[in-house]
Image (cartoon, rainbow, N blue to C red):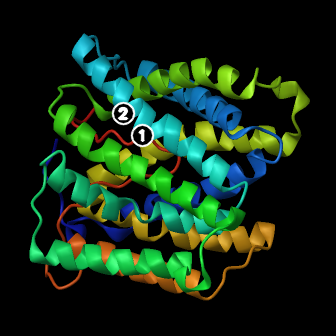
Amino acid sequence: MKPDTAPDRAALRSWLPGFLALAAIWGSSFLFIKVGVEELHPLHLTLYRVATGALTLVVVLALLRDRLPREPRIWAHLVVVGAFGVAIPFTLFGYGEQRVESMLAGIWNATTPLIVLPLAVLVFRTERLTTRRAVGLGLGFVGVLVVLGVWEGVGGAHFTGQLMCFGAAACYGVAIPYQKKFLAGSAHSGLSLSTAQLLVAALQLAVVAPLAAGAPPVPTGLSAEVVGSVLALGALGTGLAFVIHMRNIRVAGASTASTVTYLIPIFAVLIGAAVLGERLNWHQPVGALIVLLGVAVAQGLVGRRRPRAVVGVAAPAVPTVEPVSRR
């Protein structure tokens, strides 16, 4: 992997359009999930989108003349990452958005780095807990409580939906440090590992979805809006977005590219309001700002002259395996 490049060394116009496009693509994923679960069971929606994303990356892999991993050890680790980085969180977001607004799901996705850090410190031991990070975690926890509106009491479908979205972010929190510990040292490209991850997740879903939710409906029986949402989640949100993200890392550096996390909830809120007419309670965006402030403090983006690379960034529709080499 090439060393991280400071943001001021890259011409703004060379990476900003792709950076904003990526934030818009990932932020709009929550809208497409909301539309998809209107006709599809969350498991079926996840199966279709993951299969579409896997097919997209297989095509990209072939065009770049890259290849899938061959080591059984790598595939064994990908079983874990495929489940916790793709199959389970994508499904939980689907279940969650049956109960909450798409914009609120986008806000919960932004809590991922706060979950990654304690797991990376305590379980996988890939990071150290410093005072600055502890303060950031504390702020983030306060923000989570504000988003939940705990003073209004707990319970009900809306609260359950929020917990499901938070659970999805928690799954990313497991997958990211796991992949950093067991896959980041691999000689395979990020594209190769991500394609394999999606293939594994698609196989897992192909087994579980019919057992838990029945046979998936035939795509021809779905509305054009739902079919379009599935294609957007898979081909656009996974395939194209992955390519854009890899380019952003090469051009702007990993630290700058990772800050797209801060724009995803903004786009999710704007798109949810504009397209679906959704509205948030006052405490939800306030809590989101506190969460993002906590993430910024924990990652060293506040109070330091030069930002450090994030522990990990999880996107709602993109494989979470870090690129470990360049193509």
Q: Is residue 98 visible?
A: yes
Residue to which mark 1 is pinned: 85
Mark 2 highlights which residue? 81
Q: Are there few (<14), some (14-19), or many (20+) residues within 10 Å of tag 2?
A: many
Q: Residue at x 77, y 51 (%)?
A: 35
Element type at marker 2? helix
Does 97 sit above or below residue 299?
A: above
Is 73 located above or below residue 143 in the figure? above
Q: Observer-nearest residue: 230 or 207?
A: 207
Name the quarter where the N terminus is drawn: top left
Task: Residue 94 in the image: state x and y as whole percent.
Answer: 65, 47
As shown in the figure, which amino acid type bears the numbered disc 1? Gly
**Residue 258 pos. (x, y %):** 33, 60
Q: Quadrant of residue 131?
A: bottom left
Within-10-Å neighbours for mark 1: few <14, some 14–19, many 20+: many
The residue positioned 78% from the left and 38% from the top of the image is 40
Secondary element type, mark 1: helix
Q: Quick check: 222 above or below 93?
A: above
Residue 284: which disc?
none
The answer to whether the residues at label 1 and label 2 have Cβ atoms under 8 Å apart is: yes
Q: Is 240 displayed left or right of 30 in the figure? A: left
Instruction: Describe residue 55's horizontal placement relative to residue 253 as left or right.
Output: right
x, y percent for residue 231: 69, 37
Q: Nearer the viewer, residue 246 or 17?
A: 246
Tell me the amino acid under the disc marked 2: Val
From the image, which quarter does the C terminus lie in?
top left
Which one is nearer the viewer's eye here, 208 or 261?
208
As measured in the structure, the alpha-carbon distance from the residue carrying label 1 to the one carrying label 2 is 5 Å
Q: Is residue 240 left or right of residue 260?
A: right
